[in-house]
Amino acid sequence: EAGVAQSPRYKIIEKRQSVAFWCNPISGHATLYWYQQILGQGPKLLIQFQNNGVVDDSQLPKDRFSAERLKGVDSTLKIQPAKLEDSAVYLCASSLISNEQFFGPGTRLTVL
Amino acid sequence: DAKTTQPTSMDCAEGRAANLPCNHSTISGNEYVYWYRQIHSQGPQYIIHGLKNNETNEMASLIITEDRKSSTLILPHATLRDTAVYYCIVRVQYNFNKFYFGSGTKLNVKP
């Protein structure tokens, strides 16, 4: 069974630039999550989708972050414009319903 | 906000059992205890979960106290590859409640 795929694996940008991350969940998984993990901390949930609808985005900084999940499969997370404090690993996870989550390898973002 | 308390770090000798504690004194009756681990530069990996009975799978055992205020994850024969950050999480199953990861316990398995 293929796992959760994410790209790119690494990204370096200047502050105020834009960046987008892509996630392809495990086939058949209705729930998709985006997490932000700052160095030395546990992952923090940014947004949770059930199919293509948003279940929870209370922790998403909506002035600069946006996410979509078209057709209830792949998802993209965008940051525009990026700040220095956005440097982190962005993890995508998926699950059947809302139970055990399977995580992708993450995208490491560095904002200079 | 994380509803669990874990030690920051622990050491374990290779081949010995690793016992990782977790306090969750405010756990509700319908909340499960989940354990995940994160090996360096990888995404978190599910290990095990339980409600009130002890659970065992091919990776680990989960011991939950009778009052459910604490639990212990046991890796019976730790190897160097078990070096990771271990997260204890409580949440309602089959619910859209968040996973709060906290800071976890860094387990260092030493030869």
Image (cartoon, rainbow, N blue to C red):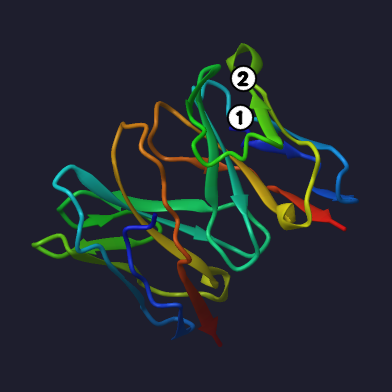
Identify the amino acid type marked 1: Pro
Q: Residue at x 15, y 53 (%)?
A: B53
Residue closest to the eye, A87 or B34: A87
Real-space CA distance between mark 1 and mark 2, rounded to the nearest whole angstrom: 7 Å
Establish whether labels 1 and 2 are both on one chain: yes
- Give the image location of residue A88, x and y in percent: 70, 55
Q: Which residue is drawn at 60% across and 68% down?
A: A40
Q: Which chain carries label 1?
A: A
Residue B55 picture quarter? bottom left
Determine the secondary structure under disc 1.
loop
* Mark seen at residue A56: none
Q: Name the residue under label 2.
A: A73
Task: Tell me: B100 left or right of A79.
Answer: left
Q: Position of residue A82 (x, y in %)?
A: 79, 45
Q: Which of marks 1 and 2 is nearer the N terminus?
A: 1
In this rendering, the answer to whether B1 lies above or below B19 is above
Quarter occupied by the C terminus of chain B: bottom right
Q: Extreme top residue here?
A: A71
Which residue appears at 45% of the width and 56% of the height? Answer: B101
Tag 1 residue = A25
